[in-house]
Structure formats: C-alpha cells, structure tokens
Image: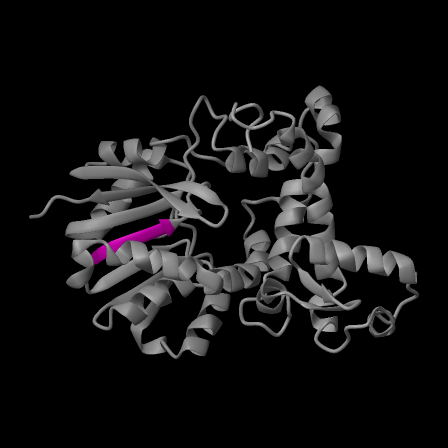
Amino acid sequence: MTFFADKSQNPMASIFEALQAPVRMAVLQTAVETGMADILTQASAPEDIAAAMDTEIHPENLVHFLDSMAGIGLAVKQDGRYVNSEFASTFLRKESPVYLGSLVLNLSRMQHRNIHRIEELVRTGPPPVKQEDCLSKESRWEASVRHLASYQRAGIAALAADIIDTLPESRTASTIMDIGCGPGLMCMEILQRHPGMKGVLFDLPGIIRLAEKEVQKEGMEKRISYIQGDYNTTDFGKGYDIIWASHNLYYVQDFSTFFLRLHAALNDGGVFVSLHEGTSAEGTIPEHVVLSRLSLALEGQNYVFRQKEIANHLRRAGFQSVETSPFVLPVGEVELTIARKEKG
C-alpha cells in the first residue's frame, strides 16, 4: 500500500488499510500466544473453547475475538461453532512441521518494539539495545534458527532451489556452499534435486550445531560438511561451483575483501548467487523493506542494502558478469544477484 499511488481508487482507502493493519497483527499475535489453532482441533463451541483455554474467560469477548479470527481467515465459523482455516491448520498448529507461530512472535518483537515511540526516538535518537536484541550477536541468531527452519521448510527452501535450477551450471556442479546457512534447509532442498552435488554449510558455531540436527533429520549427513566461524575472518576453503547467500550479508565488515575472498573460493566458471533486498528511490522503496526495518533503524540497527549495491561490490571483486533481477518472496519483492567467475 502506497498512499495516493493509484488515482483510480479512492485515496482514502489507504488510510483505512493502515488503521486495520495493527488490529490484524494483534489478532494474529493473540491467536499464536493462546495456541488457538491447537485448541480449535479439540473444541469448536465457544463454551468448550473457553474451558480448553484453562484461564478465566469473558464469553462475549471470546466470541468477538473468534469472529475477528474468522474475519481475517484464521478460522471458519458455521452455526456458531469455529474450526481452523486451512491456513491456521497448516501454519499455526504447533505440531505442524511448518509451524510459523514462533516466527510471527520473533519478527513482531524485531519489527514492532519501537513503533509506539517513533516520535520519542526521532527526538532523542537511538536507545540502548538489549543484548538479546543485538542483531550482530551469535546468541540472537541461535534463538532465531528454529523459527527460520519452519519458514524455510514452508516454501522458502523450495524457492531457493528453484533459483539454482535455473542456472545452467547447476547441471554439472558438484559442490555448493551456503554461506550464513542458518538451519541449512535451503541447501538441503537444492541437494535433494541434484543427487550428484555435495554441500558445505557455513555459519557461526552455535548455529552450525543446530543445522547439524536438521541435516540428521533429513538423513543427509554423507552429503554435507560444515565450516564454523565468522565469515569476516574464517577461511571459506576452495573448489566451489556455486556459493549461495540469502539475507545474511548485513554484517560484512569489509565488502571489498569479502567479495574478493568469495571470488577466490569459486572454481573458474563458478557462480555466486545472492538473495537480498535492494532499496531504491533514495532508500524509500520497496515499502515492505522500509517499514519492516523502521523499528530496527530507530535503534541504530539499520541493516539494509541499496539496489545493485551487492552487484557493484561483485564487479569490483573481478566477477566477469553480474546480473540483477527482481524476485518475489512471501514478504515482497527482493533483489536476486547472479555473478559468474570467468572460465579458465
């Protein structure tokens, strides 16, 4: 939604969309926090739902809340009873392999914690950041990896594999490194589609320990090895046909050196693939990036790339060809960058 962008629609509609957005988020967050999707698998009548919640419940307000869940597609109401919508059953039940409730709460804490004091922070500047909220800390990402595993399993890993499938080099590639791999499911999805390929997962030690568990779940121990460390200082090794990096290069300390190291790690004719946002119009679009980063930016954690910024670093590092194109994720449009090293 961009205010007054589409003159064919009533411009006031943008105002009312903005007013409804925090209510939608509050309903979703409450549904997650109460475990309502799990409750609705065993209770459908309001009085039974109230009993299952195991706390004192106001019956009329419970119905108001359940109606709101149904109104935004988290439940279905019929004859005064409620059941999960397909969305809630898939993504909000804790036993689901693609449960996203924890991701919702984690992202909400990141993106919303400062939005109620924007004016204050505009006046006073960034506040002290709590240790557990510092994005550059290993402990912060250890806490996030479990949420990211469900997110990747829910479809993002498949999108990553789709990108790799489009590369002509993927048909003959034997080794791929996923740098900043998180839970590693993107690399595993790629390997499942390419039986002749082996993978290397690179991330901080605590995160690699969690990625190892995901690899064991998938039974891919024989096809995956690991490099533990900070990508600013730890050796990448050599001999990769493909290197993949998705939404994790924000903490690079020296971009010129970093991309030179990536270039050296690739085989001749190898490919580096990056999936990150790219803001344009002097940093004001796309809207989803600007708004999702506002809370973090107000506290001094403004980790964001400008359009073609990564591509420019890659050209300076000596990559023969560098291409950028838009790529649509569930969160919105991001920038796909593909860089090829010259063949020997």
Q: Quadrant of residue 54?
A: bottom right
Which of the pair 167/12 is nearer the observer?
A: 12
**In the visual, does 285 lie left or right of 15?**
left
Main SS of the magenta segment? strand
Residue 238 among magenta residues: yes
Task: Farthest residue to the front: give it.
Answer: 79
282 drawn magenta: no
* Residue 222 vertical position relative to residue 111 in the rendered view, above or below: below
The residue lying at 36 percent from left, 56 percent from top is: 160
Vertical placement of 76 versus 117: above or below? below
In front of the other: 187 or 159: 159
Q: Say if residue 113 shows up in the picture.
A: no
Q: Which percent across, then down, holds residue 213?
A: 48, 73
Q: Is residue 312 left or right of residue 107?
A: left
- Near-viewer residue (183 or 118): 118
To which quarter of the image does residue 47 belong?
Answer: bottom right
Is residue 297 visible from the viewing direction of this image? yes
Instruction: Give residue 236's position: percent from left, percent from top.
Output: 30, 54
- State which region is magenta: 237-245
Residue under the image location 53 percent in, 64 percent down: 150
Q: Residue at x 27, y 46 (%)?
A: 262
Quarter of the picture holding the N terminus: top right
Q: Residue 202's x, y, as percent? A: 38, 58
Side (left or right) of 8 relative to 343: right
